[in-house]
């Protein structure tokens, strides 16, 4: 896989946030300090790290929501999309309107969404609720609708932030199958997780981020094992 | 799946309609409020100024309405719109979205409601004894001018407020000052004509309101030059602000 040119090259990337509003005494927090890795076509790359390691910030960078403060990210003229659930849901609106709005925000043309509405609602098992306001949905139903909207999404790089546990067990199984299908296909994926098992199962390569620095990049099993060892070492202390 | 201008234009259009739907579904009387709210306002002003205070007879109520209703549109649009980017926080953390969309949605939403209010105003004027005239046909031009002015001011505020949240506290005060300075409650005829020119340049709102009154009450045509200049300046500033917003698109998710 590494024979092809990388789709995304991340080089020495750092992100710092202002943490106060005092213009005379500026305080910063470095969410990411020095991150480097490559993403190749067809990869399913796992990003592992403990809470607060900077995983979410990394996803925001890759999805183009924010830009890095130092270093650079080289996108090879591709589209990236964050697999987010319930993007911009308005509780007062019907499931149909929300599906259209949400789908448009994810970049689908309106016509595509309208023609896929039946599929979306069938997959989410919400056909009877299509015209009911989303405020009458349960949390699980909302999650199912959100997930189903993003199903048809096939950008060059799909970014996933631990969404595999959606809804009840049956639906989770169903969504897991779809996810695996995507992972096994040519779809390039970046999966962010703190669960070692998930990354080992679903990814072929992995990056381990510790305190805002990319500690290790390589084969998923090797990287995740090192990450687990590190976790254990900390647990003992 | 490249995101582009036509796509986002359609999104704004759909979102405006969705917001109006959502807003009205929160109340039992839903869309009726579009009529009831401005009607109540008109009745209130009629009672206070027309019946209780008996200030300058019926004419004053008519005079007040023709200034107040365009003013309230401006006031409401700015108050809603200036927080729009801040309120889009949740969304902009999930997807990349051009931030100018947030104030745009808010501006269109208010403009659609205002068209209803404007029609009500015309009906009110008719029943209050103002005879309709051909000059009323130029009203859309004034509406468009004010729309451009609102767009420019709302964009400016919406773009700055995330960086300077304190503005949210001070802006309603400035708006109030602007209202008193724009002749909503009084006629600017008391200012001598040569000074009025300067005043109109400093405060385009006052100029706009005077033109609304000329068209609605005095059956005169609007001052095309003045309206043209206000529109042109607003349009250029708006275009500039769009560029600024584009430049800062990846900065806002960090500051809100």
Image (cartoon, rainbow, N blue to C red):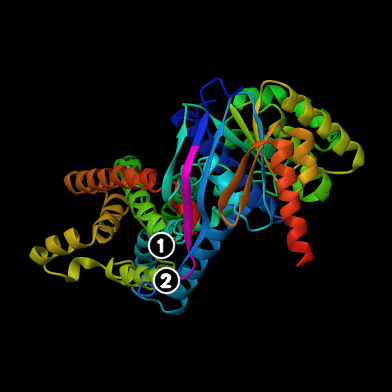
Q: Give the percent coordinates (x, y) of residue B147.
A: 37, 47
A144 versus A20 height, above or below:
above
Tag 2 secondary structure: loop
Q: Give the percent coordinates (x, y) of residue B171.
A: 39, 68
Residue A162 can be seen, yes or no: no
Residue reaching furthest to the left: B194
In this orientation, which residue lies closer to the viewer: B131 or B97?
A: B97
Give the residue drawn at x 30%, y 53%: B212
Q: CA distance from mark 1 to mark 2?
A: 9 Å
Give the residue drawn at x 11%, y 64%: B193
In this orientation, which residue lies closer to the viewer: B181 or B148?
A: B148
Instruction: Quickly name the residue at label 1.
Output: B163
Give the residue drawn at x 48%, y 60%: A17
Q: Give the percent coordinates (x, y) of residue B237.
A: 27, 47
The reply to whether discs 1 and 2 touch (Cβ–Cβ < 8 Å) is no
Most common secondary structure along the magenta stretch: strand
In magenta, the rendered stretch is A10-20
Q: Indicate the chain on which mark 2 is placed.
A: B
Specify whether residue A15 is painted magenta: yes
Q: Indicate the chain on which mark 1 is placed.
A: B
Specify whether residue B187 is painted magenta: no
Residue reaching furthest to the bottom: B53
How would you rate the neighbour count of disc 2 (Cα within 10 Å): few for under 14, some for 14-19, many for 20 or more? few
How would you rate the neighbour count of disc 1 (Cα within 10 Å): few for under 14, some for 14-19, many for 20 or more? some
In this orientation, which residue lies closer to the viewer: B121 or A91?
A: A91
Locate the N terminus of chain B by quadrant: top right
Instruction: Quickly name the residue at label 2.
Output: B166
Residue A200 can be seen, yes or no: yes
């Amino acid at each position: 896989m590494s024979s092809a040119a990388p789709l995304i090259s991340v080089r020495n990337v750092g992100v710092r946030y202002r943490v106060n509003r005092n213009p005379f005494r500026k305080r910063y927090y470095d969410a990411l300090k020095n991150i480097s890795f490559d993403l190749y076509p067809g990869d399913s790359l796992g990003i592992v790290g403990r809470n607060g390691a900077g995983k979410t910030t990394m996803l925001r960078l890759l999805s183009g929501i924010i830009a890095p403060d130092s270093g650079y990210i080289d996108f090879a003229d591709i589209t990236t999309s964050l697999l987010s659930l319930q993007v911009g849901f308005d509780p007062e609106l019907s499931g149909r309107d929300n599906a259209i709005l949400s789908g448009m925000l994810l970049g689908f043309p309106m016509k595509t969404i309208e023609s896929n509405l039946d599929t979306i609602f069938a997959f989410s098992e919400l056909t009877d609720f299509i015209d009911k306001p989303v405020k009458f949905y349960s949390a699980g139903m909302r999650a199912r609708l959100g997930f189903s909207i993003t199903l048809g999404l096939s950008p060059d790089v799909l970014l996933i932030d631990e969404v595999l546990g959606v809804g009840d067990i049956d639906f989770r199984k169903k969504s897991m199958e779809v996810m695996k299908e995507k992972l096994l296909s040519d779809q390039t994926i970046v999966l962010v997780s703190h669960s070692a098992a998930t990354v080992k199962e679903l990814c072929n390569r992995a990056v381990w981020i510790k305190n805002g620095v990319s500690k290790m990049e390589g084969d998923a099993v090797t990287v995740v094992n090192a990450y687990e060892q590190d976790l254990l070492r900390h647990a003992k202390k | 799946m490249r995101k582009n201008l036509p796509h986002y234009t359609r999104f704004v259009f759909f979102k405006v309609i969705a917001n109006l739907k959502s807003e009205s579904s929160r109340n039992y009387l839903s869309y009726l409020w579009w009529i009831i709210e401005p009607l109540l306002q008109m009745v209130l002003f009629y009672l206070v100024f027309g019946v209780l205070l008996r200030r300058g007879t019926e004419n004053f109520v008519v005079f007040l309405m023709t200034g107040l209703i365009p003013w309230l549109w401006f006031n409401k649009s700015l108050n809603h719109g200036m927080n729009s980017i801040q309120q889009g926080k949740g969304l902009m953390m999930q997807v990349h979205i051009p931030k100018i969309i947030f104030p745009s949605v808010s501006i269109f939403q208010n403009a659609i409601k205002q068209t209803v209010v404007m029609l009500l105003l015309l009906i009110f004027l008719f029943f209050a004894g103002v005879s309709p005239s051909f000059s009323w046909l130029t009203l859309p031009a004034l509406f468009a001018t004010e729309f451009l002015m609102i767009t420019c001011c709302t964009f400016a505020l919406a773009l700055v407020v995330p960086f300077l949240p304190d503005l949210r506290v001070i802006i309603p005060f400035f708006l109030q000052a602007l209202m008193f300075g724009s002749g909503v409650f009084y006629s600017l005829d008391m200012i001598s004509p040569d000074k009025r020119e300067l005043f109109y340049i400093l405060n385009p709102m006052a100029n706009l309101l005077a033109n609304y009154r000329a068209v609605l009450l005095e059956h005169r045509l609007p001052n095309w030059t003045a309206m043209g200049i206000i529109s042109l300046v607003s349009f250029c500033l708006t275009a500039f602000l769009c560029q600024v917003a584009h430049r800062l698109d990846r900065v806002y998710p960090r500051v809100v």
